[in-house]
Amino acid sequence: MKTMMKPMLLMAAALVVVVFIVFCTILFWIKSNHGLQWVQSRVNTAIPGTITIERHRLSLLRPSLGLYGVVLHDPQGLALAGFTHLAVRLDWWALWRRELRLEHILLQAPWADLTVHEAPGLNLMTALVPLAREKEADAPPPDDAGLPFNIVFKSIQLTDGRFTFTPLDDTTRLETTGITLSADGNLMARSGSLDLDLASVRFSTPGIHPEPARIALKARLNGDKLNVSTFDVTTGRTTLRLSGSADDLYTAPMVDSVLSVDSRLAELKAAFDLDGDYTGSVNAKLTLKGALANPDAGLVLAVDGGRIAGQPLDHGDLSINLQDRQVTIDPAAFRLADGAVILNGTVNLRKAFPTGFLAPPADANAIGFQLPETASSRQASPPG
């Protein structure tokens, strides 16, 4: 027995040494420039475009991957998207719990220049998806019983991003710079957080030319509850703020949110190319509470002294309430220099939306209006 054990131990030791040598050889080859070129060639033969990678870094003992200088080109060689650095670090031990845990993802200076063409469509898809595969994608996806493992994103960081988009007509352009993002998430727990900041968003289309905007978003998902603590849009002297929460997202959504807007009429005139003289300030507040299909809502609008389309306006107030699909316009007054315009009434939406607002209207002609004849009356202003 002892004479047999010795050769077996020698064979086992030799096998371990061979496996170790093979493993080190494969690791060394994968980390070499030759291995990188081989991977690039396999990827580029599978897509219509090409992907170039300046260099990479791979570690299996402490599982991590780093890619540097990655650029995606279309079939004509035009650069469409890329990034300067991507770092991904995994947790091996989580695999024993049937969990793919991404400990850290860092994406530095990502960018994309997207355009839509008439024949091929979105330029990014023409670089990544072969035409035959695009046709296959039109078929409905098979039923999925769910992933056999959980996916956890412990930390996702994105810095200094840039994005541009030009649609088919080439008259509209969207450009975003200074994109930063911080997020985490758990797929099976349906939980995660997002902190997004867009330093400069430029949008232009015929008839609409707003000033560059800054957008900040902070949101948290916990099961079937979504909480948006911050959603701010600032452009010039105009500020839009939204905060609120939504419960029962996957069954019967319930919302509780507040939206406020503070602006100047002169900025709105410039943004929308309006004719005439516009001065003064405008403030609006919208509240939404209850079932998303049939919420209670309230809108309060106030316009302080100035001019609208060249007409002087001392003050304007408008209050609208929505309850059980009926709109009530509270007595509103727009006080002009030579009088006032009074507006009030109701709009009944119950027959048009018998099951709520999430379904299309059953009959748009069934909307009922009740506006008194004095809705547009002008009253003489009292002597000063």
Image (cartoon, rainbow, N blue to C red):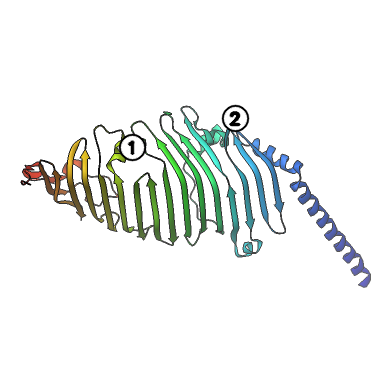
> Image quadrant of residue 305?
top left
Say above or below: 49 vs 89: above
**Are circles 2 and 1 on residues that touch, CB within 8 Å?**
no
The kind of residue on which mark 2 rests is: Pro
Residue in the image at 52% along x and 55% along y: 182
Residue 273 in view of the camera: yes
* In the displayed structure image, the side of residue 336 where residue 240 appears, left or right: right
Residue in the image at 59% along x and 52% along y: 106
Label drawn at residue 222? none
* Element on which disc 1 rests: helix
Residue in the image at 50% along x and 40% along y: 163
The kind of residue on which mark 1 rests is: Ala
> Image quadrant of residue 16?
bottom right
Q: Residues within 10 Å of mark 1 (few under 14, many from 20)?
A: some
- Residue wearing tag 1: 271
- Residue wearing tag 2: 75
